[in-house]
Image (tube, rainbow, N blue to C red):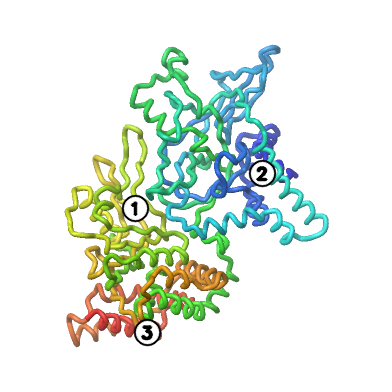
């Protein structure tokens, strides 16, 4: 049985042994998949695998097993490589077979040559995606993940079985740490290598001219070119995954390369024109800045809350159902302090935080609840402080001051660059569950230029239908999102919102907002409970009994009969969404008539406040 040192610190050794003992081409590949799947399904063993998110790239040992929590920013064409190849001993003429699966380079032992034209060579195909650290991931999320990593060996000691097994698990965990430290102190020598897929021609690239393609300006988390060997897996742009694979930073992708050195301007017999060279150079940045990850296991992430397992066990869901009512009361009290005692705004904000698109009907994104909080004084620090509080509760947020400069200069919509054959990121390229806090109080009189008008249109489309049309130059391609948008404004927002509510403080507003907000957060224990509550409430399933739906239909007909303008079809849709969120806030998966009555009363009070 391979030890920790084998399968984490040297996964290629495990893979090579399976290849050498293979009985068929498909059998050994299946064994590799099953081996790593079995290991990584064990949460204790999974926690031993280091993460690219937690350390600087230059501190990560190459060819080790590594995790990456990320969003797919762009998808490339499939990459063809030498899956198996023939080697010949230059002195004896003996031949043997090698594999470059899970590698960027061909292993060429000393004294051997690769027979590139061998009829026994087999070409493989792998999917290639460009991934970035999850946009808008909040600081508390990063800190919790790092804390898990930093106490990895100790966690294994206290959570495993006991006796010799506990001791061995502790020693294996310490092996990972020692090997990592040894790597940092060992001089690095570049090996002799042959590429399995070929690097771009041109000069060496540096950090000054390599774009990391983060959608949100100013973010600088890790990025990675991820290579997936399961051709049947459907990988979608903007979705979040945790990829686990062989971490590759082979120097062939970091050194200068002159195409004229190969076959008089040919690379493996392929001529390069200027456009092709630019595309290859763009798609193969230096591995020291953009490493490669050859995936042995992957899982889509429904959430990135580190306080919860990736897959929610039934026991946690049952506990949430029991405790949700009490946690809801605690969160409402906290949000009332955020809104200076305004309970209607606090309830509206709770509904907004729990909302998500749970189905689509035509162009309608059912379940979204964009919120507009009015009554915010101009030139106030409140919107930014408000955004900071929300960031401390949920996993992904971004604060957008809606200044003329931002609207006219930021690129909101991703755009396809055909010369580089890459999708250039836009500000609205966000993963599902991200919360966007828009500060409209920063919008002062002035003119929007064509870019500004386009950005407002893209933002309006996101808020109306959770759709952004990506610019493919010759045509627009719709990409569907699930981004929670809340707009803080002085009067009614210029942007389309589902729910509008006016902030009317019931307690005196602090003269020093910074000091007030510094005292606002609850204890760490309560804060973590609220974070878990919001994630579980946001993820909850929902259904409606036919009898309840019939009663709602009767209410709608009665309301229309008494006053045709009192309730429109849009009003009914909004109330149904809020009713679902009322149920979710109480940990329930089905709407009850009592919830419908509460929602109707809430909406009447809200409308009264708006007068």
Of pointers 3 and 1, the one earlier in the residue sequence = 1
Q: Quadrant of residue 490?
A: bottom left
The quadrant of the rendering that contains the C terminus is bottom left
| Above-or-below relation of 311 to 427 | below
Of pointers 2 and 3, the one earlier in the residue sequence = 2
Q: CA distance from mark 2 to mark 3?
A: 54 Å
Quick check: 64 left or right of 226? right
- The reply to whether the C-beta atoms of the residues labelled 3 and 1 are less than 8 Å apart is no
Quick check: 333 left or right of 175? left
Front-most of residues 502 and 65: 502
* Residue drawn at x 71%, y 41% as measured from the top left: 6
- The reply to whether the C-beta atoms of the residues labelled 2 and 3 are less than 8 Å apart is no
Q: Nearer the viewer, mark 3 or mark 1?
A: 1
| Secondary structure beneath label 1 | loop
Q: Nearer the viewer, mark 1 or mark 2?
A: 1
Q: Which residue is mark 3?
A: 598
Q: Point out which mark residue 428 bears.
A: 1
Q: Which residue is mark 2?
A: 8
For residue 275, say whether it is visible. Answer: yes
Location of residue 442 in the rendering, given as x and y in whole percent from the top left corner? 27, 61
* Residue drawn at x 50%, y 29% as measured from the top left: 253
Of pointers 1 and 2, the one earlier in the residue sequence = 2
Dot 1: few (<14), some (14–19), or many (≥20) neighbours within 10 Å? many
Q: CA distance from mark 3 to mark 1?
A: 35 Å
* Residue drawn at x 37%, y 70% as measured from the top left: 352
Location of residue 556 in the rendering, given as x and y in whole percent from the top left corner? 26, 82
| Secondary structure beneath label 2 | helix
Front-most of residues 132 and 318: 132
* Residue drawn at x 36%, y 74% as measured from the top left: 511
| Above-or-below relation of 211 to 39 | above
Front-most of residues 16 and 11: 11
Location of residue 164 in the rendering, given as x and y in whole percent from the top left corner? 82, 55
């Amino acid at each position: 049985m391979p030890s920790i040192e084998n399968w984490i610190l040297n996964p290629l050794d495990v893979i090579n042994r399976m290849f050498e003992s293979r009985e068929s081409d498909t059998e050994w590949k299946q064994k590799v998949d099953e081996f790593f799947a079995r290991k990584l399904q064990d949460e204790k063993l999974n926690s031993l695998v280091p993460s690219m998110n937690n350390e600087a790239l230059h501190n990560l040992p190459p060819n080790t097993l590594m995790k990456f929590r990320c969003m797919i920013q762009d998808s490339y064409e499939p990459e063809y490589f030498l899956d198996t190849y023939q080697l010949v001993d230059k002195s004896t003429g003996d031949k043997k077979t090698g594999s470059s699966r899970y590698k960027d380079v061909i292993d060429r032992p000393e004294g051997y040559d690769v027979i590139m034209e061998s009829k026994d060579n087999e070409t493989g195909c792998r999917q290639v995606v460009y991934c970035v650290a999850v946009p808008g991931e909040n600081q508390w999320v990063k800190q919790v993940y790092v804390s898990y990593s930093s106490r990895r060996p100790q966690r294994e000691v206290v959570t495993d079985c006991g006796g010799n097994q506990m001791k061995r698990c502790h020693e294996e965990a310490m092996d990972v740490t020692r090997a990592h430290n040894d790597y940092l102190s060992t001089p690095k020598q570049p090996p002799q290598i042959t590429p399995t897929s070929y690097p771009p021609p041109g000069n060496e690239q540096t950090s000054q001219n390599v774009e990391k393609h983060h959608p949100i300006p100013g973010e600088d988390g890790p990025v990675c070119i991820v290579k997936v060997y399961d051709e049947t897996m459907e990988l979608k742009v903007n979705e979040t995954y945790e990829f686990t694979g062989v971490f590759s930073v082979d120097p062939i992708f970091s050194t200068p390369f002159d195409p004229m050195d190969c076959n008089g301007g040919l690379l493996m017999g392929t001529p390069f024109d200027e456009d092709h060279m630019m595309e290859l150079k763009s798609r193969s940045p230096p591995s020291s800045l953009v490493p490669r990850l050859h995936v042995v296991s992957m899982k889509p992430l429904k959430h990135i809350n580190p306080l919860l397992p990736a897959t929610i066990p039934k026991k946690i869901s049952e506990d949430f159902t029991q405790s949700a009512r009490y946690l809801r009361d605690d969160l409402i009290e906290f949000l009332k302090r955020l809104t200076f005692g305004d309970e209607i705004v606090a309830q509206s904000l709770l509904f907004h935080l729990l909302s998500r698109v749970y189905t689509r009907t035509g162009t309608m994104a059912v379940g979204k609840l964009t919120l507009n909080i009015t009554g915010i004084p101009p030139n106030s620090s409140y919107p930014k402080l408000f955004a900071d509080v929300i960031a401390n509760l949920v996993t992904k947020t971004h604060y957008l001051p809606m200044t003329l400069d931002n609207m006219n200069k930021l690129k909101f919509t991703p755009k396809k660059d055909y010369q580089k054959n890459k999708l250039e990121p836009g500000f609205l390229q966000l993963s599902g569950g991200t919360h966007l806090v828009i500060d409209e109080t920063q919008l002062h009189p002035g003119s929007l230029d064509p870019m500004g008008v386009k950005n407002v249109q893209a933002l309006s489309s996101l808020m109306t239908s959770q759709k952004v049309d990506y610019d493919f130059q010759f045509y627009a391609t719709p990409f569907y999102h699930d981004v929670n948008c809340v707009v803080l404004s002085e009067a009614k927002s210029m942007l389309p919102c589902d729910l509008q509510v006016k902030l009317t403080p019931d307690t005196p507003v602090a003269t020093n907002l910074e000091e007030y907000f510094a005292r606002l957060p609850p204890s760490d224990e309560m804060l973590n409970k609220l974070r878990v509550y919001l994630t579980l409430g946001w993820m909850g399933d929902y259904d409606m009994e036919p009898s309840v739906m019939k009663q709602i239909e009767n209410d709608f007909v009665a309301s229309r009969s008494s006053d045709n303008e009192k309730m429109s079809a849009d009003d009914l849709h909004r109330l149904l969404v809020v009713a679902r969120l009322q149920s979710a806030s109480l940990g329930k998966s089905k709407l009850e008539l009592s919830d419908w009555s509460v929602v109707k009363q809430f909406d009447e009070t809200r409308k009264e406040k708006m007068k």
